[in-house]
Image (spheres, rainbow, N blue to C red):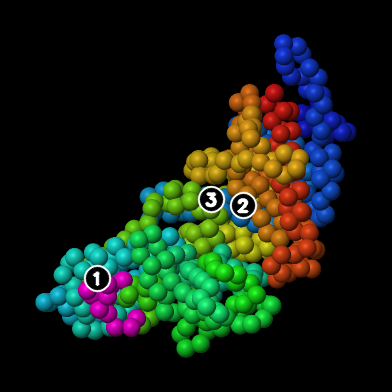
Amino acid sequence: MLSRRDVLRGLAASTAVVSVGHGAVAQTRIASGEALVQSAGLSGDVAFVVADLRTGQILESRKPGQAMPPASALKSITSMYGLETLGSQFRFGTQLIATGPVANGIIQGDLILAGGGDPTLGTDDLNEMAKALAAKGVRGVSGRYLTWADALPYAREIADDQPIFASYNPALSGLMLNFNRVHFQWKRSGNGWALAMDATGQTVQPTAYTASASIVSRASPLFTYSDRGGVEKWTVASSALGRGGSRWLPVRHPAAYAGDVFQTLARAQGVPLPPPQSIGRFPGGSVLVSHASNPLPPLLRAMMKYSTNLTAEAVGVSASLRRGAGGSINASGRAMSDWLQARTGARSAKFTDHSGLRADARIAPVDMVTALRTLGVPVGLRGLMKPFKLRDATGRYMKSQPFAVDAKTGTLDFVSTLAGYMTAPDGTELVFTIMTGDLARRRRYLGQARPPGQTDWVRRSKILQSQLLERWAAVYGA
């Protein structure tokens, strides 16, 4: 007896479905998945799987076992890994610790700014901690002002194949601030520009003394970076500045950055501190002030919405450390691969990070779909995903769509992935993964900020994703 999948595979270019419109039965021809792939004209590989969420039956597939880069869709796996390992009540913490008592407003010992790996810690959070410290009557320290950042292993960057100025590829550390980004501003002033480096927040905008910028008369490169004397030094090409603007730049020494900013904020609250010093061994002491991040579910929801790579790495590495594995991003990625293989049998899973920023990560569509169904549903993954908007044949967002899709996108140069859940018009729940990638073209233009043909390639990939979703809604939910 032929299965439903066997029947679908036997269809050549279209499937006939019956729909009701204007009081009469109308015949509508729906292009097959293969026909849609061919019309997209994408170079490289296209693979997908769509399955019934309730039963797990694969309804349609193309190269289901081909392992491909998931890009940021890997954050879906990281979310499941984090929730299962750390729990929904987990919060990252940051503390101010005194190694001695407070006497006459002076800490009789050292003050330590101790990071707990919080990727969401912001300047406003540090400002509130400075206020709370002053409210306790603290007016200074007799010893040192220290920073501790060993709650997570240090990594200078997440991936080594990104542009040097990419703010989405900063360092990882146990003490982080503003997603480890510094705010660079420039404004035309006379015959030159006025420059500023700061740790801007919603309520305060302290100068960042651990970073500096200078302008060089050149056409390219856009930015250069060097690390001299504890200051991260950037040069920027004058031809790219215009009259004014701002952008975030990555921070490579986050503990020094956070320590410097807190020193400025504490001084403004009447608590002068000596220059910060980094320590590797966590000393004992009394906690004076604590700050906690949001619980894991809303933190992950924000990560999925804005695709924040640093959050993914902090959550993934924290989960691996909880399991006694992962002394680096790469080792932690392997630990997450082992976990997924043990939980679902996903033999294709080969992860090298948790954000998908590295293009050498791999997973097959069938294994991604299995994970979304068997692990994602119990932890409420769909509720953490962003509603997906369909695109029309020109690539523009549709004004309305007759069915709901919640998914995680993933985009690298010549890589585009979409993985998630959809509710067809008749209420049928589906789970899917669509992966496209031209790794040969990606390697050819590695390191270029805007590879030729990349924008059009990704646009056609996203149109194909929408067309496949429309097809599945019509065929399996009409």
Q: Secondary structure at mark 3?
A: helix
Q: Quadrant of the N terminus?
A: top right
Residue 367 place in picture, x, y as percent: 66, 48
Residue 386 highlighted magenta (yes or no) = no
Instruction: Give the quadrant of residue 362.
Output: bottom right
Please give the range of residues in magenta. 265-276
Q: Earlier in the sequence, mark 3 or mark 2?
A: 2
Q: Among all residues in the image, which is located at the extreme top?
A: 23
- Do the CB atoms of the residues marked 3 and 2 lie less than 8 Å apart? no
Front in this rendered view, residue 423 or 204 = 204
Front in this rendered view, residue 295 or 66 = 295
Q: Nearer the viewer, mark 3 or mark 1?
A: 1
The amino acid marked with disc number 2 is Ala
The disc at residue 86 is none
Q: Secondary structure at mark 1?
A: loop
* Residue linked to disc 1: 269
* Residue linked to disc 2: 73
Residue 16 falls left or right of residue 170: right
